[in-house]
Image (cartoon, grey):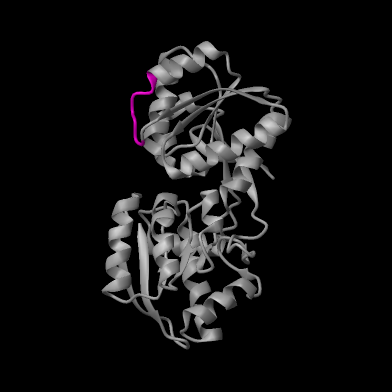
């Protein structure tokens, strides 16, 4: 989803919000951004959500001096896409290192196979994990890649089974992850799976059931206050706070504060964001470094216990 904001008044809340679905796809996102920047004359973008969206629309935002603030994109290349590009979600350069250190140093794993989709998020996280794991003395003995949303992963898993890997690192989204968990068991494999923050989607664990017991993954630290959760439950009793929800919430207020402080001018807003005081958001403490990245992100190691996501350790 790409959320594009046309204008924010310096002393008021949002004037108007225009929403376009980027479909987690680069081409779709470019079409949406072109229309909204060139026809609707938007000045601020909250999005994209997927890295593929943000990577696709960042050059257009930079060229037109449109502020782009992504609340969920984590591909490392986004750090270097321009002065008007920000994100209040950590780069996978952090997440890959956290995962590699935990697998090598805490779990004592030396041989890993990587199972990764050919999408921007998976590719970025795969590369960061591989580089950091090998720098620690570990060995990536096999990399199996597949097209986005592939559901039959039996041949890739069979190759990993033959490799005698001690762990499978799998940074991917919901559908392929569910298939991998189920098909691994069908093949008689007991190799542990370790994933990324997209595994916060409870659909995975509801579908995978008890066979996913003990599965681990990295995720940003949950700083959501009990008060916020209570208000959310009151307003949306049939929903849950999904990954990125609090980051989107904070992004609205960060932009609003920036415009109130510096005026409705994107160059001045850009300068404010680079130097703004720490913002105490629902998702955590937010400040931006020289690349527009989130400073000092905190991660947690999660695992599945009784079909539910539990926190194993904060790192």
Q: Is residue 9 above or below residue 102?
A: below
Residue 301: horizontal and vertical position, in percent?
Answer: 62, 40
Q: Tell me, yes or no, if residue 312 can be seen here.
A: no
Occupied quadrant, residue 232: bottom left
Residue 289 position within the rendered picture, expressed as x and y whole percent measured from the top left: 64, 64
- How many numbered discs, if any? 0
The residue located at (58%, 54%) in the rendering is 90
Q: Is residue 14 left or right of residue 82?
A: left
Tell whether 71 sits left or right of 291: left
Percent coordinates x, y for residue 78 in the rendering: 51, 55
- Residue 173 picture quarter: top left
Check the image and report above or below for 147 versus 253.
Answer: above
Q: Residue at x 29, y 54 (%)?
A: 28
Q: Where is 196 relative to 14, above or below? A: above
Residue 288 in the magenta stretch? The answer is no
- Which residues make up the magenta segment? 148-154
Using residue 308 as the reference point, say whether residue 14 is left or right of it. Answer: left
Quarter of the figure that contains the C terminus: top right
| Image point (40%, 23%), residue name | 182
Residue 48 or residue 271, whichever sits in front: 271
Q: Which residue is more in the foreground, 55 or 307?
A: 55
Q: Nearer the viewer, residue 37 or 246?
A: 37
């Amino acid at each position: 989803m790409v959320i594009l904001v046309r204008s924010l008044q310096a002393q008021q809340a949002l004037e108007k919000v225009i929403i376009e679905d980027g479909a987690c796809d680069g081409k779709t996102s470019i079409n949406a951004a072109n229309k909204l920047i060139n026809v609707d004359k938007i000045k601020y973008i909250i999005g994209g959500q997927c890295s593929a969206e943000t990577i696709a629309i960042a050059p257009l935002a930079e060229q037109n001096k449109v502020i782009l603030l992504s609340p969920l994109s984590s591909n490392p290349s986004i750090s270097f896409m321009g002065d008007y590009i920000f994100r209040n979600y950590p780069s996978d350069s952090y997440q890959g290192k956290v995962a590699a250190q935990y697998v090598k140093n805490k779990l004592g794993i030396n041989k890993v196979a990587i199972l990764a989709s050919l999408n921007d998020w998976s590719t970025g996280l795969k590369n960061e994990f591989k580089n950091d794991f090998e720098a620690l003395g570990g060995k990536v003995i096999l990399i199996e890649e597949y097209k986005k949303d592939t559901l039959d992963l039996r041949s890739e898993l069979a190759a990993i089974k033959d490799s005698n890997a001690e762990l499978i690192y799998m940074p991917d989204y919901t559908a392929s992850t569910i298939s991998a968990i189920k098909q691994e068991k069908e093949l008689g494999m007991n190799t542990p799976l370790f994933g990324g923050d997209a595994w916060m989607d409870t659909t995975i664990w509801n579908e995978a059931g008890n066979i996913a017991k003990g599965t681990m993954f990295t995720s940003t630290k949950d700083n959501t206050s009990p008060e916020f959760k209570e208000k959310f439950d009151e307003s949306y009793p049939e929903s849950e706070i999904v990954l990125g929800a609090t980051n989107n919430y904070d992004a609205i207020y960060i932009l609003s504060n920036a415009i109130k402080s510096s005026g409705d001018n994107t160059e001045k807003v850009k300068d404010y964001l680079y130097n703004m005081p720490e913002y105490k958001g629902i998702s955590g403490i937010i400040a931006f470094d020289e690349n527009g990245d989130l400073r000092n992100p905190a991660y947690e190691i999660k695992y599945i216990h009784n079909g539910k996501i539990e926190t194993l350790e904060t790192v």
